[in-house]
Amino acid sequence: MSPSYRNKPLIQDQMEYNFREVEPRWQAYWKEHKTYRVYADKEKPKYYVLDMFPYPSGAGLHVGHPLGYIASDIYARYKRQRGFNVLHPMGYDAFGLPAEQYAIQTGQHPEVTTENNIRRYREQLDKIGFSFDWDREVRTCDPSYYKWTQWTFIQLFSHYYNYKTQKAEPIAGLERQFAHSGNVDVNAACGEVTRFTAVEWLKMDEKQKREVLMHYRLAYQADTFVNWCPKLGTVLANDEVREGLSVRGGHPVERKRMKQWFLRITAYADRLLDGLEELAWSESLKEMQRNWIGRSEGATIFFGLKDHREKIEVFTTRPDTVFGATFMVLAPEHVLVKKITTKDYQQQVDAYVAAAAGKSDVERMSEVKTVSGQFTGGYAVHPFSGEPIPVYIADYVLAGYGTGAIMAVPGHDSRDHAFARHFGLPIVEVVTGGDVSEGSHDDKEGTLVNSDFMDGMDVPTAIRTVIQHLESKGIGERKINYRLRDAIFSRQRYWGEPFPVYYKEGVPYVLPESALPLELPPVDKYLPTESGEPPLARAKNWETEEGYPLECNTMPGFAGSSAYYIRYMDPHNDQELVSQDAVSYWENVDLYIGGAEHATGHLIYARFWNKFLCDTGVVVRDEPFKKLINQGMIQGRSNFVYREKGRNRFISHGLKDQYDTMPIHVDVHIVENDILDINAFRQWNPEYKEAEFVLEDGQYICGWEVEKMSKSFHNVVNPDDLIEKYGADTLRLYEMFLGPLEQAKPWDTQGIEGVFRFIRKLWRLYHKNSTFIVSDDPASDKEKKALHKCIRKVSEDIERFSFNTAVSAFMVCVNELTDLHCNKREVLEPLAIMVASFAPHIGEELWHLLGHKESVAVARFPEWEEKYVRDDQVLYPVSFNGKTRFKMELPAGMSKEEVEKAVLEAPDAQKWLDGKAPKKVIVVPGKIVNVVI
RNA sequence: GCGGAUGUGGCGUAAUUGGUAGCCGCGCCAGACUUAGGAUCUGGUGCCGAAAGGCGUGGGGGUUCGACUCCCUCCAUCCGCACCA
């Protein structure tokens, strides 16, 4: 081996851009100089760019995670260079199940593992070169943070929702009103309360009063059926239960009645719905929220019972079809089922109810197609005709929606139709336009028939009319129903915010603010107690100073994430959640980037939380997130080898169909360009050490497929490895270059070489043989044109969040400037500023090499000028009957007529005209010429 | 079933207002430099065809001088919701 051989790569390294030295140097500089620190500066316009903060899991980041952070970072840097005062913080959603599960297994305090994970996340994030103001970091599990989560809970507990004023108001005002005139005049969001007078109120003792008030509070306690898993000692969400077993562990889950804390989010249903209008969110996301809220307009109607004084209340969106109601159906859980069931049907009804109770929600959903039900023996009375109508119970009526009872109109509802068919019940047509013996006519098109006073009306008129009749007779009223449920707000867990609540004689009271934060107590185990109480029941002295027991439930994950964007505005304030000063300056989030998986969870709760804080004067804007972008998922690109069945032999992709093979995932790190590194493969798994291979062209070609990025598919790519190999700037550019931000796209490490070459090509514009060669000579028109086209494209693309095309524009520009051998400061300086948003390290390095002392972060983004991008010659594509045939260069200023003349005279045109006269010539100046023959 | 989105070279994609389809990059092919190349540089690369030319943006139809773009219809894939009265 000759010495020159060994030296060669070294010399090359010196000449090339050395990201391994440059990137850590600037990261240290930014940290030391607090380059990205931000204050509420009233002289400057504010802009708030927020990322959904991560849950710090033990696995660290893969290349999919930083995608949104990179996009928001580019935008934040761009806005800063545009003169905005940019708030761009980061923190951690640090309470959560995985840490607790790990604690149960290992006995380690979740705080310890969480702290470790955060440290690892921070290292990874720092390497990517983000412009976060880390002095504003928040962690939801930090007592100084959750103090304000607890504080907000106390506020929710102490407020009710007044429908008259359409906002939250202090519960004390409600108490005054009760003392003055009872609850008759109150129009508030509440549970089921009976009417009472002022005298009755005043006669109640404190316990009774508190019970009544509990029905009005925005944070309230109520009994509910939950998915209780005795083995895990906790309540599970619907998606944590499959086929009656817990997803984790596979333990039996039962429906259990339990007291839980709730947030009265339904009070805000209309405002949550209406607020969507003003938001710059994607239509699909808004639609998801609309569906989740599920507002439907209709009426409630009371049906009397034949042999009982009670009435059945139903909700219907089609009160106009009331004369078509030939039977009624109650949910099996409906309270009146017991009462109306006659002796003859007792057994069958009991059996049906028992069977329904044993089924999980998921099971009931999966049986959608089967019609089942049971007659109760009871009859209701039609509110208008007085006819008796049979009452059934059936699974297809849900206890949790509407009133849990329906009037069944088989002529105009497909499910009722199927049910009527199955049980041989009469089907009556009340709206024309279909054939009800064939199937139900569900549309609102048609004319009312067989409907007494509504005959001849169209559907909308009939709906208005019947509601008037119902209201005047006092047997029903107009009603808006929602699918949205109040949010269950308690968990039987350890690793969450403790409730600032204690119990006096079984009645819950909130702690005074001075007692906050109520810190999580140490426990001996992170499991429920033997008697099934939550882990906090294990804590010693878990009581107030007076000896009252404290609440043992903790808050769910969304508690801490519902107001973190507010806390970033004033993260160290220990007097209030946020100062009026800070919030009146920063207002709300201008740009929010995060995953679509939070569409109906976090994004609904946060909006609700924010509206409440707005009502109570804590924040100044009704909506928290003005614009929201869901970054698309980065998928994995998996590689496969094909093992011959029953043998330790692998067949190359192109030959696999000639053998009986099965595909096996292979680690993408030992595959390059779909060619398997056979030696690495043999070492990868001892099982394959002696493997044989059937090759094509001397190589083993792997198959590939796009799948979720997951350990089990061996397709996870770690950003640290890529940064080590190519640098953070290359990673950032490549993540953006991959495709549109909002679109899901597969990760293919192969392509990163292209942006890596771009970075080095950029560097070479400013350097020759490792010497900085930028000159102060004036730039040529061509050079300026390349630059100004780039400024225009990049700024327009950033404004519309089209980062992939912006990267492409940089490449085009650098290619052009390279061809022009441009080394002019006039061009290269603005280019460095622009590049710095995307690739901050090389941008900062070039900026300082250009002689600047301040960070490029505060440089002014260049403006493009029309005069430099204008063309004086236009290359006209000339088409005949819409097909482009040749191109012709003409001066830009030419009139339509001149262009037409010039084109028709051209020799190329003669060929295509073939002696015929053109019927018509279309000239779009500066664009195109089309000749019609 | 309902709602939303997406279909363009071998791959990721581009075409901002109806105006040259395929920019930029990967891969591939050829060449240069080289003892060597998985380095670097240069050129080529939608498909068919020797060429002339023809065909091409999921399929079919329409509007238009002109359609990836607008309209109708069908198909496929992905996501969300799902007996919501």
Image (cartoon, coloured by chain):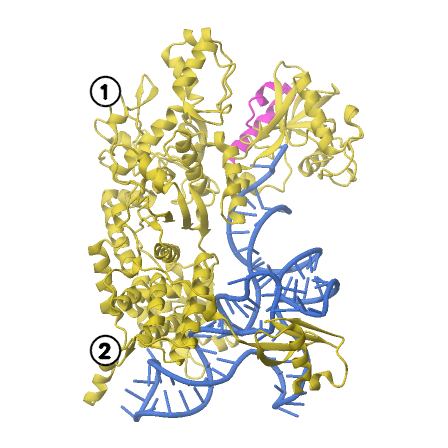
Q: Mark 2: which amino acid? A: Gln
Q: Quarter-wise, where is residue A778 in the image?
A: bottom left
For the point 61% across and 77% down, the residue is A877
Q: How far from the left and from the top, in percent, is residue A864? A: 43, 65
Chain in blue?
Answer: B
Q: Nearer the viewer, residue A673 or B39?
A: B39
Which of disc 2 and disc 1 is earlier in sequence? 2
* Residue A31 to residue B24: above or below: above
* Chain A tint in image: yellow
Report the residue marked by disc 2.
A14
Q: How far from the left and from the top, in percent, is residue A717? A: 35, 63
Tell me the chain of label 2. A
Q: Is residue A441 visible?
A: yes
Q: Quarter-wise, where is residue A139 in the image?
A: top left
Within the magenta stretch, is there residue A342?
yes
Report the residue marked by disc 1.
A547
For the point 34% across and 27% down, the residue is A154
Q: How far from the left and from the top, in percent, is residue A453? A: 78, 24
For the point 57% across and 74% down, the residue is A892
Q: Write down the region rendered in magenta.
A: A333-359
